[in-house]
Image (cartoon, helix red, strand yellow):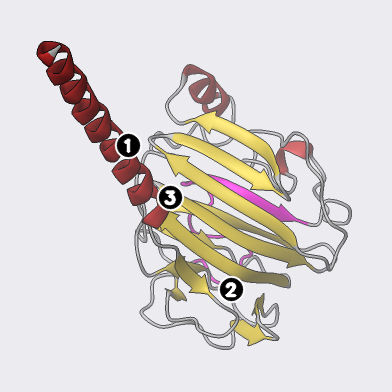
């Protein structure tokens, strides 16, 4: 009887330790703090690509939104912090025929190509496409809103009308990437997988062997020369 009691006590202690460890791990994940990148007012977590300050006048803060100014030379926004594994949430809307994108793991190694409508990193990094699918001159599905730009067509996409906000999410964890749009997962892929390598080899990115090779870096919001609206931007490490 005494031996049985000791065994039961040891088993209970073991289960308590396991439960405690699992709870601690879950609590640690749950407590990883969100970093507010834009709360409707402050731009302290953002700056212009290749510069130390926020590009005032190029990006405007209006009615709780970040708004691109199409009447200036383009300047992309980057996070001041760098991220490897993360979850990014943001809301976006566009004017008629507007184009933009969100890039991950960006390095600031290229000169800013202001005024040409393109990010200096659009041939270097994975991009979540932001677009007016109906009126932009390029209506190819693989370059539509929510796509992994020019590589993967979004599936199960429900896009809001022009002027309304779409809620988006980008997740990266150990090379696994997901694009979410209005509550639906629209793109999923594995960096370095056979399938992705084949897609890259048959794309316009094939001439750049370093495309998407960086595993950490800045998150970048593109100024493409048209009016785009962003709000409720936050990120956390995972």
**Residue nearest the viewer, comparing 137 with 85:** 85
For disc 3, the marked residue is: 86
In the depicted structure, whether residue 42 falls above or below residue 189: below
Image location of residue 55, percent across then percent down:
50, 82
Q: Nearer the viewer, residue 75 or 178?
A: 178
- Disc nearer the start of the sequence (1/2): 1
Crowding at mark 2 (Cα within 10 Å: few <14, some 14-19, many 20+): many
Asked whether residue 76 appears in the rendered view, the answer is yes
Dividing the image into 4 quarters, which one contains the N terminus?
top left
Whole-percent x and y of residue 65?
66, 78
Q: Secondary structure at mark 1?
A: helix
Task: Name above or below for residue 126 compared with residue 114.
Answer: above
First in residue order: circle 3 vs circle 1: 1
Tell me what residue is drawn at x 20 percent, y 27 percent.
Answer: 14
Label pair 2/3, CB-CB below 8 angstroms: no
Identify the residue under disc 1.
22
Residue 16 drawn at (x, y percent)? 26, 33
Q: Secondary structure at mark 3?
A: strand
Mark drawn on residue 74: 2
Q: Is tag 2's residue or tag 3's residue first in the polypeptide sequence? A: 2
The region drawn magenta spans 113-131
Residue 84 visible in the current orientation: no
Q: Residues within 10 Å of mark 3 (few under 14, many from 20)?
A: some
| Residue found at x 67% / y 63% | 91
Depth order, front residue of 221/158: 158
Q: Residue at x 51, y 64 (%)?
A: 234
What's the distance in space between the residues labelled 3 and 1, CA to CA? Answer: 21 Å
Label 2 element class: loop
């Amino acid at each position: 009887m005494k031996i049985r009691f000791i065994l039961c006590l040891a088993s209970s202690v073991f289960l308590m330790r396991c439960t405690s460890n699992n709870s601690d791990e879950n609590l640690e994940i749950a407590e990883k703090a969100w970093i507010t990148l834009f709360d409707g007012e402050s731009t302290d977590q953002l700056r212009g690509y290749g510069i130390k300050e926020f590009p005032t006048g190029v990006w405007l803060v209006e009615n709780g939104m970040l708004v691109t100014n199409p009447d200036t030379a383009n300047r992309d926004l980057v996070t001041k912090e760098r991220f490897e594994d993360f979850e990014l949430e943001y809301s976006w809307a566009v004017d008629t025929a507007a184009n933009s994108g969100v890039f991950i793991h960006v390095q600031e190694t290229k000169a800013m190509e202001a005024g040409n409508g393109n990010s200096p990193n659009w041939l270097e990094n994975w991009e979540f496409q932001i677009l007016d699918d109906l009126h932009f001159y390029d209506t190819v599905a693989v370059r539509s809103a929510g796509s992994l730009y020019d590589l993967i067509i979004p599936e199960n996409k429900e896009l809001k009308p022009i002027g309304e906000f779409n809620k988006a999410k980008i997740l990266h964890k150990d090379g696994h990437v997901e694009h979410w749009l209005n509550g639906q997962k629209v793109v999923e892929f594995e960096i370095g997988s056979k399938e992705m390598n084949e897609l890259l080899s048959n794309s316009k990115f094939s001439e750049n062997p370093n495309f998407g090779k960086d595993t950490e870096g800045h998150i970048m919001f593109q100024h493409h020369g048209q009016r785009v609206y962003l709000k409720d931007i936050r990120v956390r490490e995972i």
